[in-house]
Image: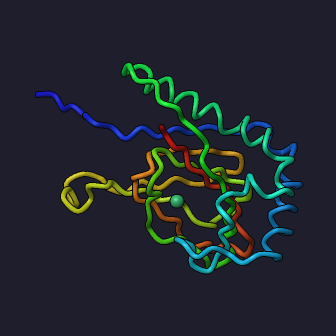
Amino acid sequence: MEELEIFPTRIYQGYDENLSEYRDNLMFRISEHSVNHASNAVSNVGGFQSNPFLYDVPTFREFHDVLWNAISPFIDQIAINIGSLGNAPKLTLHNLWYNINYPGAYNIEHTHPHAVYSGVFWIKVPENSGNLVMSDPCKHIIYGTVPTDYAFVPEEGKIIVFPSHIPHRVEVNNSTENRISLSFNINMS
Ligand SMILES: [Fe+2]
């Protein structure tokens, strides 16, 4: 007998080796923006989630190139994989926002509707500030028969891109410092 794992969930992970060059400046702009704007209320509980179109905010224009350099390799790889199936869709970075999870904050389970792939880019990750936990979208049916949750331990500079329909949540920030990340959506047309 042999066991086959079919229909795998393809997750992409890597690092932006250049983050240290702009990290302090980016965190300054995030802090500056968050004290002058209201948080969006989405999956965040106790934390701050910015306007999802951060690319349109003038004080973040200086980060366009460095963030594109960090994220575009993921888009390119997804395009290659889709291309291997004989398809050639247009993939675009639709939006991008920042998240500040203050001590005690967390994100309830959610998906990213109307996107095909979504990503997270960890900028500031104190120890014990909350893992990213993904759940199998078929959890209801297969619960207890195979592992249905997977925890990613966040690391500064690390980027994870995943199918947008995968339910995911962020655990409580049990540290005494803010946990800062960027999130983004990739659309296909
Ligand atoms: Fe999310």
| Residue placed most toward the observer, 148 or 71 | 71
Direction from residue 14 to residue 68 in the image, left or right: right
- Of residues 121 and 132, which is closer to you in this image? 121
Quick one: which residue is furthest to the front in this view? 189
Q: What is the x, y in percent for residue 185?
A: 56, 49
Q: How many marks?
A: 0
Residue 7: x and y, percent?
28, 36
Which of the image's four quarters has the N terminus? top left
In which quadrant of the rendered view does residue 97 lie?
A: bottom right
Residue 166 pos. (x, y %): 40, 53
Residue drawn at x 69%, y 61% is 98
Please identify the residue farthest to the left as the structure is shown.
1
Q: Residue at x 30, y 53 (%)?
A: 147
Quarter-wise, where is residue 182 in the image? bottom right
Q: Is residue 58 left or right of residue 98?
A: right
Q: Give the image quarter of residue 16.
A: top right
Nearest the camera: 131 or 188? 188
Q: Position of residue 113 (x, y in %)?
A: 44, 57
Residue 162's place in the image compared with 1, above or below, is below
Front position in the image: 57 or 16:
57
Q: Is residue 9 above or below residue 145?
A: above
